[in-house]
Amino acid sequence: MTMTPTSSTVVLDPTRHVPGVRPPGFADTLRAEWIKFWTVRSTFWSTAMLFVLGAGLTTLVCGLAAKDIASGAAGDPPGAFITWGMMIAQITAIVLGTMAVTSEYGTGMIRATLAAMPGRGAVLAAKAIVVSATLYVVGTVTAFAGYFGGNWFLDREGVGVALSDDGVLRSLFGSGLYLAGLGLLAAALGLLVRHTAAVLSAVLGLVFVVGQMAWLLPGTWGEWIAKLMPGNAGSGVAMAVSFNPQLLSPWTGFAVFAGEVAVLLAVALVVFRRRDA
Amino acid sequence: MVGGAAGRQGLGHDFSIRCDGMIAAHDLTKTYGQKTAVDAISFTVEPGRVTGFLGPNGAGKSTTMRMILGLDRPSAGSVTVNGRRYADSPAPLREVGALLEARALHPGRSARDHLRWLAVSNRIPAARVDEVLALVGLEAVAGQRVGKFSLGMGQRLGIAVALLGDPPVVVLDEPVNGLDPEGIRWVRTLARQLAADGRTVFVSSHLMSEMALMADHLVVIGRGKVLADCAMSDFIADHAASFVRVRSPQREQVADLLRGSGLDVAVHDDELRVQGLDAAGIGELVGKYGLYLHELTLVRSSLEDAFMTLTADSVEYSASNAAATPVGSAR
């Protein structure tokens, strides 16, 4: 490494007008968070993985199951399969949401962030927008790619679904919405817990394990608890035809899920504002 | 107030940045449960000079610095920069530049990208990024991920971050940690230059020897309390008194003679410690009376010793109670 000669440290002239012409605002906070998000490799790899899993698995499963779907042996209608891969791609959405927050705590970066942008509400809002916008766009694009890939096989067996069929477009855009919501859920929990492994375990456990086990609860109240679990309530919107008839209707379920995410974000905001960095 | 500070009114050209350049702590307190890390300290840091913030590890230096930067919330009291809380600054990086722990970075991000998002967040022109990279000598590795950086390179990047907004107030927490001797000299020169520009420079360290070379003013802290707040020169005069060591086979007579001449004489084992006259003067005086001398040495007690004496009672983790040695003082 070369060393700048000591004399060149004098180039700083304090009377020089370095700063810009107006004070930074929320748009600058948002841009800063956007740069931070996209300048670590894990973001690229996670979004690439999201696409590969989401679109790839949908295509693969439709390709493998097309004959069974056509013959009725699969037990579910073709619409239940056209966003199949998105159920796995959820994992990468959760990873992205978690890492956007916990990587800052793991490295001490959070102090640089809050020294540069002391408005904690604005930082949280900017992170939420960056994570959810990215996941919404990538999730929706992935769902469309999976649909076109999978439907090619379904069409060959004569059971293809059209974009105009009931619930198909809703499930494709809904996939983006659901992944965006999951990312926010993970980010909010990230702010509360601050440790990558703990947050990942908690969110994955909540969505994939606790959510499924809740169906085993007895009685009407048990059924309601299961219906209201975030993964169960939110995922309906991402499926043209649900595998699980007990789920809430797509938009009702998504509203419940969005409400849960909003509450968690609000709690995260309160804690984030009070806590030392 | 130093002239440079007045000259920077251009900084607040469209929005008000009041620039008295002062850091002012008032009864600043931080408690963690039962433990008081910072105990109602008050001090001001003024522009145009380097103020050293000195204390053994665990004395509350970093906690104080985090409170200055609005990262930690004071339990009581307040600290302001330019007359207001740091968090109330419209563009904090342009007002206060800070070097926090060297690793307040994501290891996967490049040095340039790290500076880039910081610049964007405070509307600092993008050109300034390359300027500070050159300033700290990191332009050749700007595209590399900072996880590969040595401690010293990380420290340089931290200093680049601090200077990014060309701020009138610079806060450096242990800036020489991990630097080689050349790097240490560079930081020292830089700090002095920043102060000469008229900036407020607040530098923490647990090394008295480093502060003696860098700081004009000194705030010494131990166990969360301010132990001294004075000019460096006063601290040296008060705490690092020199004496002349005198050994003689005729110790008693020599001691009587010197005392009779109005000098301070203390007896330590077989030596006399004399204050009030230089070695040459003592030699001549003793010679006049035909007494023998075996040793005549000027001894300057080091600042490190003075610092340790001052903070001996307040060292949090000492090697033993008998030898209260602040961690890292073994230089």
Image (tube, rainbow, N blue to C red):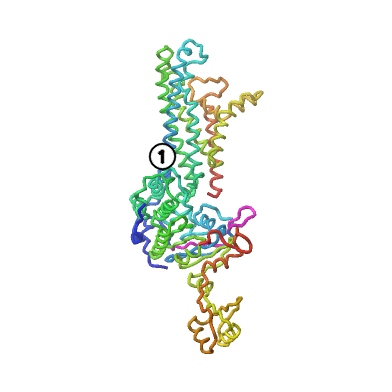
Residue span colored magenta: B20-37
- B287, B25: nearer the viewer: B287
- Please report, as a chain letter, where disc 1 is located: A
Does any portion of residue A129 appear in the rendered image? yes
Q: Main secondary structure of the magenta part?
A: strand
| Residue B107 in picture, x, y percent from top left | 45, 44
> What's the amino acid at mark 1?
Trp
Corner quadrant of residue A66: top left
The residue carrying mark 1 is A38
Would residue A173 appear left or right of B59 to someone viewing this image? left
Would residue A17 appear left or right of B203 to someone viewing this image? left
| Residue A133 in picture, x, y percent from top left | 43, 35
Looking at this rendering, what residue extends furthest in the bottom direction?
A: B289
Q: Residue at x 45, y 26 (%)?
A: A54
- A187, B9: nearer the viewer: A187
Q: Residue at x 58, y 65 (%)?
A: B311
- B87, B165: nearer the viewer: B165
- B296, B111: nearer the viewer: B296
Looking at this rendering, what residue extends furthest in the right direction?
A: A219
Residue B196 magenta: no
Corner quadrant of residue B2: bottom left
Above or below, A9 relative to B268: above
Q: Secondary structure at mark 1?
A: helix
Q: Residue at x 43, y 65 (%)?
A: B47
Does any portion of residue B90 appear in the rendered image? no
Above or below, B50 relative to B113: below
